[in-house]
Image (cartoon, rainbow, N blue to C red):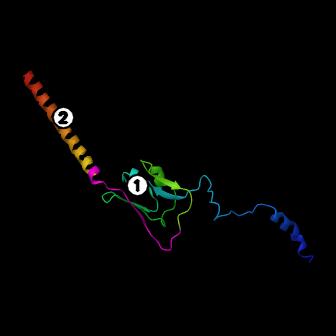
């Protein structure tokens, strides 16, 4: 019985103090301010420029502009944050916390919403701008020719 007495003080201290561990299932984990976390995207804001793909050291990000797809291989991503820094539209962010564990290696594919009417409007605006530039150039050329004829 005497051999257990040296621990009695520690047992009483632990009995009346807060636990040293966190109450994980009941209280959410508070991550420190500079925790890296995992990459998330706001696909609606993405312009599919590919800067994130070119700046990713392990090559975990792939951007397919014609298909309007943004892909990340979470197992290859090292959470360095270079993609977030290089994104010109700031649609990427590092979310504190860990990625949900998975049983097999998978790739996360995010499809950008495709609106055919919006694409048609963009194409029409582009064609209108080209036509306006051509008309402006033709008008400038005609004015130049008229000025040269007036001098002669």
Residue at position x 15%, y 32% from top? 139
Q: Nearer the viewer, residue 1 or 79?
A: 1
State the residue lying farthest toward the bottom: 1
Residue located at (40% from left, 54% from top): 43
Where's residue 69, x and y in %? 36, 60
In the image, residue 132 sits, relative to residue 45, either above or below, namely above
Q: Which mark is residue 20?
A: none
Outermost residue on the top side: it is 151
- Provide the residue span drawn in magenta: 101-118
Q: Which residue is mark 2?
A: 136
Q: Residues within 10 Å of mark 1 (few under 14, many from 20)?
A: some
User: Residue 133, image x and y in percent?
Assistant: 20, 38
Residue name at image x 90 percent, y 72 percent: 5
If the image is split into quadrants, where does the C terminus sit? Answer: top left
Is 138 left or right of 48, judged from the image as shown? left
Residue sticking out furthest to the front: 26
Residue carrying label 1: 43
Q: Quadrant of residue 131?
A: top left
Query: Percent position (x, y) of residue 94?
Result: 51, 55
Q: Nearer the viewer, residue 94 or 57?
A: 94
* Left or right of residue 6, residue 144 in this image: left
Q: What residue is shown at x 51% (from left), y 62% (from top)?
A: 78
Name the spot of residue 100 as percent of width and height, x first.
Answer: 53, 66
Of the two numbered discs 2 and 1 on the same chain, state the one appearing first in sequence.
Answer: 1
């Amino acid at each position: 019985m005497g051999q257990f007495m040296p621990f009695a003080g520690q047992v009483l201290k632990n009995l009346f103090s807060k636990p040293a561990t966190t109450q994980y299932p009941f209280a959410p984990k508070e991550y420190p301010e500079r925790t890296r976390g995992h990459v998330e995207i706001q696909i609606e804001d993405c312009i599919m420029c590919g800067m994130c793909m070119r700046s990713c050291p392990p090559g975990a990000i792939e951007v397919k502009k014609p298909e309007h797809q943004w892909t990340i291989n979470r197992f290859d991503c090292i959470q360095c944050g270079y993609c977030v820094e290089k994104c010109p539209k700031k649609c990427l962010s590092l979310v504190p916390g860990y990625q949900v564990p998975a049983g097999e290696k998978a790739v996360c594919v995010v499809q950008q919403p495709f609106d055919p009417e919006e694409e048609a409007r963009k194409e029409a605006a582009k064609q209108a701008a080209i036509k306006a530039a051509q008309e402006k150039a033709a008008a400038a050329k005609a004015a130049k020719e008229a000025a040269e004829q007036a001098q002669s």
